[in-house]
């Protein structure tokens, strides 16, 4: 018997052993999946609270008003430059810009004021 024949026979045994190990792991994984699915089906489903969209939008707008006021008060602390002052039109545009900033901040960030208002108002 040659060395290559011995190696081939050992390779076949290793491959057979490897296939059995993979099959055993596949069976174990399938059993875990089946157990998990059975557990989830037997578990009662919690019904989540339905969010009142109109109330939440009103709370977001209220938060937006607060943030807008805060931004305007912060702007007052910055000194005006007489050289590049835009006059009355710039002040109007700046107010509208801060209103948009505050609305976008309230919608996209999680400041928490709208959520607190919603929880307080929806409990009644």
Image (cartoon, helix red, strand yellow):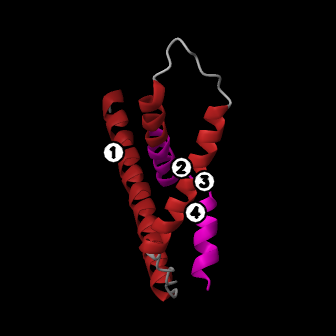
Q: CA distance from mark 1 to mark 3?
A: 75 Å
- Secondary structure under tag 1 reads helix
Q: How many C-alpha atoms fall within 10 Å of the one at disc 2: few (<14), some, or many (≥20)?
A: few
In percent of width and height, residue 117 lies at: 61, 69
Q: Are marks 1 and 3 in contact (CB under 8 Å)?
A: no
* Residue sitting at x 59%, y 65%: 115
Q: Which mark is residue 66?
A: 3
* Residue sitting at x 52%, y 86%: 43
**Residue 90 visible in the current orientation:** yes
In the image, is 16 to the left or to the right of 48?
left
Of the image marks 4 and 1, the number of the one nearer the N terminus: 1
The residue beneath circle 2 is 109
Of the image marks 1 and 3, the number of the one nearer the N terminus: 1
Snapshot quadrant of residue 79: top right
Q: Is residue 123 magenta?
A: yes
Q: Are marks 2 and 1 in contact (CB under 8 Å)?
A: no
- Secondary structure under tag 3 reads helix
**Residue 2 visible in the current orientation:** no
- Secondary structure under tag 4 reads helix
In the image, is 105 to the left or to the right of 112?
left
Tell me if residue 73 comes above or below residue 60 in the rendering.
above
Marks counted in the figure total 4
Q: Is residue 112 magenta?
A: yes
In percent of width and height, residue 63 lies at: 57, 57
Of the image marks 2 and 1, the number of the one nearer the N terminus: 1
Q: Which mark is residue 12?
A: 1
Q: Which mark is residue 114?
A: 4
In percent of width and height, residue 68 lies at: 56, 47
* Circle 4 or circle 2, nearest the eye: 4
Q: CA distance from mark 3 to mark 4?
A: 10 Å
* Residue sitting at x 50%, y 60%: 61
């Amino acid at each position: 018997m040659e060395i290559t024949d011995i190696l081939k026979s050992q390779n076949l045994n290793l491959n057979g052993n490897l296939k059995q190990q993979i099959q055993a792991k596949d069976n174990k994984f399938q059993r875990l999946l089946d157990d998990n699915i059975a557990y989830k089906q037997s578990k009662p489903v919690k019904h989540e609270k339905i969010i009142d969209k109109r109330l939440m939008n009103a709370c977001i707008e209220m938060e937006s008003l607060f943030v807008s006021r805060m931004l305007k008060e912060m702007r007052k602390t910055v000194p005006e430059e007489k050289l590049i002052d835009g006059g009355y039109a710039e002040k109007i545009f700046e107010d509208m810009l801060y209103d948009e900033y505050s609305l976008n901040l309230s919608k996209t960030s999680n400041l928490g004021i709208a959520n607190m208002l919603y929880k307080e108002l929806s409990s009644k």
